[in-house]
Image (cartoon, rainbow, N blue to C red):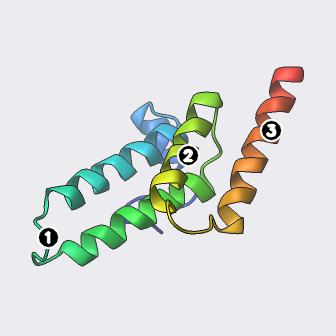
Amino acid sequence: MVGNLEPGATASAAQSGMTEWELALAFYVAKRVQSDALPLGSEGEDQALDEYCEAMDYVVLNTPAPDGKALAIKLRLAKERWSNLKIPDDWLDAFIADAERLAQVREA
């Protein structure tokens, strides 16, 4: 579970009129804005950082990209998060699965 966003948030997304992807991305953006608003070293900064990283993980690992634009967003998140490190295999696997699924949809 990530904050108030749980895996399979499809029901919540349907009620809000948003897709699961849109809901997960909006949740991530909200957590990122909260984290970025806190001054360095302030109380709650570490927790806010952890929460936005968990939300980012959820977007990348648990929410299939519905289109090429969404896949590009995921790749930008990876570039930001892992700029000086090796991108973890589970993240790469998620990107590959999205690309393969989107290619199949396009070919159909």
Disc 3 versus disc 1: distance between alpha carbons? 40 Å
What whole-number distance in Å separates the C-alpha atoms at marks 2 and 1? 26 Å
Residue in the picture at 14% in, 56% down: 37
Pointer 3 residue: 101
Secondary structure state at the residue bearing disc 3: helix
Mark closer to the observer (3, 1): 1
Element assignment for label 2: helix
Residue that lies at the very extreme toward the right in this rendered image:
108
Label 3 crowding class (10 Å Cα cut-off): few <14, some 14-19, many 20+?
some
Give the residue number, with chain letter if any, for mark 1: 40
User: Which one is in front, 8 or 15?
Assistant: 8
Q: Position of residue 107 (x, y in %)?
A: 89, 22
Residue at image position (49%, 59%) is 83
Q: Amino acid at mark 2?
A: Lys
Residue 40 at x, y = what percent?
Answer: 14, 70
Distance between mark 2 and mark 3 Cα atoms: 15 Å
Q: Position of residue 86 (x, y in %)?
A: 62, 68
Is residue 88 at all visible to an observer of this figure? yes
What label does residue 2 carry, if any?
none
Q: Is residue 1 left or right of residue 71?
A: left
Q: Amino acid at mark 3?
A: Arg
Kind of residue sitting beneath label 1: Leu
Q: Is residue 18 above or below residue 26?
A: above
- Determine contact: label 2, label 1, CB under 8 Å: no
